[in-house]
Amino acid sequence: MTKRFLAGVVLFGVLLAVGSLQAHHSLAGVYDLNKVERATGVVQKFAFTNPHGALHIAIKNAQGEAKVWQLTTGSANALVNAGLSATGPNRIKFGDELTVTFNPAVSGATIGFLRSMVTPDKKEIEFVPN
């Protein structure tokens, strides 16, 4: 009985560890880390969440058509450490015009990993991936 219980505990621990390892993903699998794009757009939504935030920003292409890009950010803590907040004077809100740099998706989808932004008050904020 004790051996079976101990084996069950060990198996549970291994499964728990494997599950958390699978949940963590590489930036290189989704984003082209060798390519950096710069664009100016209008904020549609800014999700100040964990484990990753998201900036939804309408960016016009060469033909003048706006497409909403979803740019992944660091955690809420990383955003606070960069000088942003979910509320108050340092927040990014709907309608703000931002200039962003980001690594675009390998697949060509309108997603990317946010590298930096210039806020409406001309403050440049850089994000360093973990």
Image: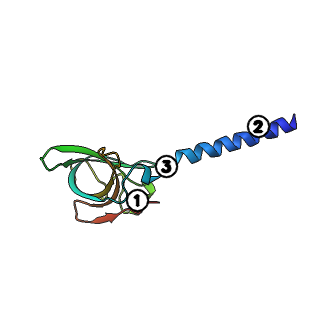
As helix, strand or loop, the secondary structure at mark 3 comes to loop
Callouts 2 and 1 close, C-beta under 8 Å: no
* Count of picture labels: 3
Tell me if mark 2 has few (under 14), some (14-19) or many (20+) residues whose alpha carbon lies within 10 angstroms of its own. few
Q: Nearer the viewer, mark 3 or mark 1?
A: 3
| Image quadrant assignment for residue 39 | bottom left
Position of the N terminus, as image quadrant, is: top right
Q: Which residue was labeled with disc 2?
A: 8
Q: Is residue 29 left or right of residue 62?
A: right
Q: Nearer the viewer, mark 2 or mark 1?
A: 2
Q: Which residue was labeled with disc 3?
A: 25
Q: Amino acid at mark 3?
A: His
Residue visible at 22% across and 63% down? 121
Q: Estimate the spatial distance between the alpha carbons at disc 2 and disc 3, rounded to whole Å.
A: 28 Å
Q: Position of residue 42 (x, y in %)?
A: 21, 50
Which is more N-terminal, label 3 or label 2?
A: 2
Q: Position of residue 97 (x, y in %)?
A: 20, 54
